[in-house]
Image (spheres, helix red, strand yellow):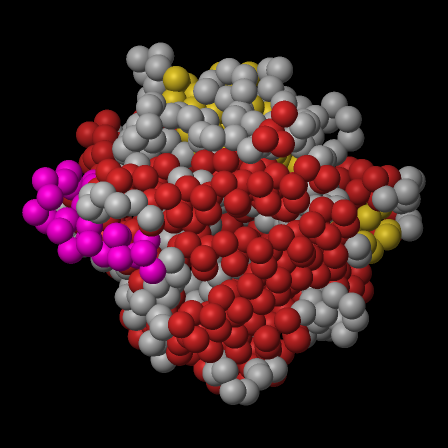
Amino acid sequence: MIRALLFLSVVAAATSCHTVKTTEAPASAKNPLLAPWSGPFGGVPPLATARVEHFRPALEAAMAEELAEIDAIAQSKAPPTFENTIAALENAGRALSRVQTVYDIHASTLSTKEFQAVENEMAPKLAELGDKIVQNEKLFARIAAVYDAREKSGLTQEQQRVVWLTHSNFVHAGAKLAGPAKARLSEINQKLASLFAAFNQHVMADETGRMLVLESAADLAGLPDSVRAGAAAAAESRDQKGKWGIVNTRSSAEPFLTYSDRRDLREKVWRSFYARGNNGDANDTKQLIAEILQLRAERARLLGFPTHAHWRLEQSMAKTPEATLALMESVWTPAVARVHEEVADMQKLADKEGAKITIEPWDYRYYAEKVRKEKYDLDQGALQPYLQLDKLRDGLFYTADRLFGLKFTPVSGLPLLVDDELVYEVKDKAGKHVGLWYFDPYSRTGKRSGAWMNAYRRQERFDGEISTIVSNNCNFVKGAPGEPVLISWDDARTLFHEFGHALHGLLSNVTYPSVSGTSVFNDYVEFPSQVLEQWLETPEVLNQFALHVETGKPMPKELLEKLQKASTFNQGFATVEYLSAALVDMKLHLAATPDKAIDPAAFERDTLAALGMPKEIVMRHRTTQFLHLFASDDYSAGYYSYLWSEVHSADAWEAFVEAGSPWDAATAKKLRDHVFSVGNTIEPADGYRAFRGRDAKPDALMRERGFAKK
C-alpha cells in the first residue's frame, strides 16, 4: 500500500513505484503499464509505450489488485504483527504505484484533452480507493494492535516510526469515524478529487491557450536576444512564424515584464498572466474554489477539527495555524517597510527619466532592474549571457559530487516521454549505482507551469535493494535549434532548488518505502532544496560553470562583487509577493465553513487590504490560479512551508559559514547523515538538532533577507 500510505501522508514529491515481485493482472500482456518495469537499473518506466487508452484499464486492474491485497491482510487469522500487517501494507499496491507514476507524469507534462477525459473519470475512483482502505475496520484494528504493542515488540527505530506514521495517517484520514460519517467523508473526498482535476485543467488552459502576439520589431524594445529568440520559437510553435509570442506562463511573462520598454505591452502581459482563472469564462475557477473550501471545512469538522487549517497542521512541524501566523507576521512588517523603500527608489528614477507615471504592478520588475543598475551597476541582463542551462546543469553535478560524492553520467536508449528529455545514472564515490535522474527542462503545450521534482521510484531495501528514480521538471523556453538556452538568475536559483529535492531522494538510505526520500512533513521538505540554492553563488560554481555564451570566460571578478553586494536587493518585493500568498492561504482556510460559500476574489481583496498590502505588488499566486492550494490538498493551508523551511535553510547555511567553507567535509557529512539520507525515519526536529547541535533560529533568515544587521 505504498501509494495509499504516501497519499495519506504529507508528502512533497509525486507517487513512487517499485520493480519487485507482484501478482500481475491478466491484462498485463496487452497493457504495458501493468507489467513490471523492464530494462536496466532494476527497470525503468515505460514512458515511450504508454498511451492514453492504456490508463483507464491499467488503473482499474491495479486498483482491484490492491484491494485484494488489502483484503488478504485484513482477513488474516494470524495475530497482527509488524511483518504480517505493517510490512504487508508496505508491499501492497506495487502494481498501482507503477501505473500511477506514468499516469501522473502524463497529467503534469503531457495533458491532452483525451487524457483529461480519463483524469476526470479516474480522479474520484482513486479517491474512493483510498477511502476504502482507510475505512476497512478489520485492517485498522490490526494496525491499532501493532501500534499499541510497538514499544514492546522488539522493533527497530525505523520500524517503530513506520508503525506510528501508518497509524497516525489512518486516524488523520478518518479511520475512527462511524458509519454515516465515513460514507460522507468518502463522498467529500471523491468530489474534491474531481474539483482538483478541474481546477488544474482550467488553469492550464488559461496558460497554454493565451498568448500575446507581437507583430513588429518595435514591440521587442528592451528585450534581450535570448528572450526574443524564445518568443519567436513560441510564436512559431503556435503557427505564427515570423512573429513573437509571450505565452501566458511565468517562464515567458516574467522576463518580458522585467525587460520590455513597452509599458503598454507590459500591462497587457501582466493583466493576462495574473487574471488566470478569473476571466468569467469557461476556465474561471472561482466557483471551483468556493466548493473546495466548503468541502474541506466540512471534512475537517467530520474529523474533529475546527478548520481545514487545523486538520492539515496536525501533521507538520508547526503543529498549529497560530505558530505559522506568528512567523509570517513577524517577517511581514519589515518586508512591507522595505517595499515602500523600493517603490520610492523606483518612483524617483521614473521621475528623473521624465516618465510621468506612478509605479504600478506591471512596472515593478522593470524599474527594479533600473534601480539595481543605478545602485549597484548591476544589470540582470548582463548576468544572463553567463547563465547557460547546459553549463549550470554541469554545475549541479559538480555540487553534488563535491558535497556528497555523487557522480552523474548520461544514459541513452531508455524509453522517454519526449525527445528532449535527458537521463543520467548516479553513482556514489565507490562507483556503486545510486539511482537515475531524469531531466525534462522545456515548456510545451500540456505541461503545467513552474518547476518540480518527482520520485518515479523510491529507494528501499525492504524487499531487496531498490534504487531510486527521480526527475526534475522545468519550463524553460527553447531557443532556436542549436542555440544555447540562457536563463535568468532567478531561474538558476530554481534549478538548484529543485535539484536539492532530487538529491533528497537520491541520498535516501532507509529500509521502508513509505519513509523514503522526500516523504517528510511539507514544512521540512523544502529545507534541503532551499539550502542547496546557496551553492549557486559560490565562487567555485560560478567560476567554472557561469561561462559567457560567446567568449567562454567566467564572470569577471567585478561582476561577482556586484552580485554579492546586491544580494539583498529587492527582497521586499520577493518576500511580500510570497508572504501575501501564504497569509491569504492560511486565513482563507481558517475562515472557510461548510455553511457559507466564500467569494475567493473578494476574500483576497479584503484580506490584502487588512494586511496593508502595497498596491504595487500582487500575490505570487493569485487565489484563482493557486495550484498549490486547489489542484490537490498537498500545500493547502501549507504555503507557509517555504518560509518555515527557510528558517532552517538559512540557519543551516550559517553552519557552513561558521566552518569556514561552503565545502566543509564534516559539515556536509552531518547534513547528509541527519537530513538528506534519513527520510521520515526520525522526527524532523530531532534530525535538525543532530545536524546543527540546536534548534533552528530565525535570526539567519532575517539577516539573509537584509531585514536585520548581519
Magenta stretch? 137-160
User: Residue extending furthest left?
Assistant: 152
The number of numbered badges drawn on the structure is 0
In the displayed structure, 32 sits above or below 494; it is above
In the displayed structure, 44 sits above or below 564; it is above
User: 282 and 533: which one is in front?
Assistant: 282
Residue 307 in the figure: left or right of residue 159: right
- For the point 14% across and 40% down, the residue is 155
Does the image show residue 417?
no
Residue 546 appears at what percent x and percent y? 53, 29
- For the point 52% across and 58% down, the residue is 128
Quadrant containing the C terminus is bottom left
Q: Quadrant of residue 601?
A: bottom right
- For the point 40% across and 78% down, the residue is 301
Quadrant containing the N terminus is top left
User: 349 and 258: which one is in front?
Assistant: 258
For residue 138: magenta? yes
In the displayed structure, 393 sits above or below 703; it is above
- For the point 62% across and 32% down, the residue is 27
Does the image show residue 419?
yes
For residue 641: magenta? no
Residue 630 appears at what percent x and percent y? 56, 64
